[in-house]
Image (cartoon, rainbow, N blue to C red):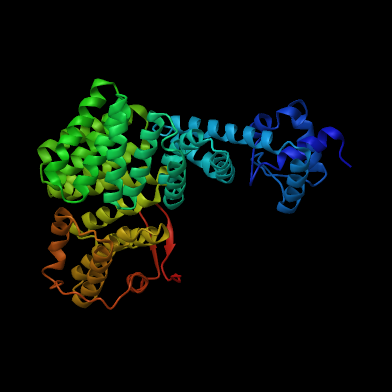
Amino acid sequence: MLDPAEQGLFRQLAIFSGSFNLDAVEAVCSDARAYVLAGLSGLVDKSLLLVDDTANYRCLETVRAFALEQLHASGELDVASERHAQHFLTVAERANRHAGGPLQAAWFDRLEGAHDNLRVALRWLHNAHQFEAALRMAIALQPFWTTRGHVTEARDWFAAILESGLNSSAPAVAASALNCAGSLASTDHEYTVALELHRAALDRARAINDACNIATASRWIGHCIAQTGGGAAAQPFFDEAMFVARSHGLHTELGLVLQEFAESAIELHDYAAALPALEESLDIFSRTGDRIGEARVQFAMGLGALGLGDDRSAVAWLERSVAGYTEVNYVLWIAGAEVYLGLALLRLGDTERASSVLTESLLLSRQEQDDHGIAFALEALACVASEHGDAQRALRLAAAGEAILTRLELPMPAWDKALLERWLTPAGVTGHDPSLGLDEAVQYALEASVATSQTGRTVTHNIEIQ
């Protein structure tokens, strides 16, 4: 039997989904706060609550369902839901303040553990028509969602909340939300959608002279134009973003736009402009401890070295980039950096290591359901086949990659195409063999049994593609 205090705590714990910690219980179950520690121990002793070795608690679903009925019957559900939502909004916004610093990986891990509760809180805020609070939570979670591979879910949340609450939210919140939604669309290579969202964000930000969102929107507009072959047309937007960021002391935003500008300059073979920008950007991210920012600049440094023919420097920079992305578990960008690392190794004649790195890139892109990444990895593996003198295999892999890019309506940038031509043009890989679908092409590329990556992971390749 539970005493009245235990009954109250037991009911209120039903508001949690998945695991939760003591801080969350103390914040949400405020009516039972004085009894929390003793009450949790009592519920564990009575097998109504589980606790793991990290002091995280969890209710069995059958037990939670019963407790939730009791919470509803007591008339306390709305109050408990409000407290739960406000607590996890606070957690998300606190995590976001660390997203560009040395604690970003630890906070992303914490958010991963709290993801079930974050979803419950976000759903409740949306259903309760607290749209601005819901947008604030989604904005705070966007770096976590992007880094940890929850892009599809994130886009669904932004679409739903923006549809309901865009015009009822404060202009700065609305502009931030539009920028976040646009960045997620860019992650999925949907640049037309992203441009529309960022232009809407820029209009709202300019109307209220919101420097941060002006700089962010301008940077992303430049990014989208550059990614779709606009080249020099992106420059005015990068210029505006840099001017606003410098004028208002927006250091992280300045680091980001310098990196974006530099990558665009590399695409245009303007290495003299790119390298100083990258050096300044890297200095900013190093001083703030932003490992994701550092890894992205190291990636761009690797591209610059490749473009200049300094393959050993390219390998060194790209290995550092892979290590940085691995530290924060940013799988999509681990895969992206590994493609160029594999090509740099191939240019140095290390075909075995190149094949290993490129195969893992393919697997990681498949894991993340990133068809664009799969296509580029297939094209790079075609280069390995060409280096081995297997023109037929090179043809099939390259054609499969090309077919995916055609379906996505994402032609390979000229800079990347020129990088691959060293192997594919001499091998006569110019035809189009549409016989391999995506899954067949991945299986065909994974004929080797095991590869060990440069990050120390061992990956089994003879997987079953679902």
Residue 201 percent location from the top left of the image: 32, 36
- Residue drawn 20% across and 26% down? 243
**In-image side of 108 versus 226 (left or right):** right
Q: Residue furthest right?
A: 1
- Residue drawn 70% across and 39% down? 77
Tell me if residue 346 can be seen: yes
Residue 346 percent location from the top left of the image: 21, 59
| Of 464 and 248, the residue lying toward us | 248
- Residue drawn 42% across and 50% down? 151
**In-image side of 454 versus 112 (left or right):** left
- Residue drawn 41% across and 43% down? 327
Classify residue 115 by image quadrant. top right
Residue 281 percent location from the top left of the image: 25, 32
Tell me if residue 251 can be seen: no
Quadrant assignment for the N terminus: top right
| Of 369 and 301, the residue lying toward us | 369
286 vs 398: above or below = above
The number of numbered discs placed on residues in the rendered structure image is 0
**In-image side of 165 versus 325 (left or right):** right
| Of 68 and 309, the residue lying toward us | 68
Residue 188 percent location from the top left of the image: 34, 53
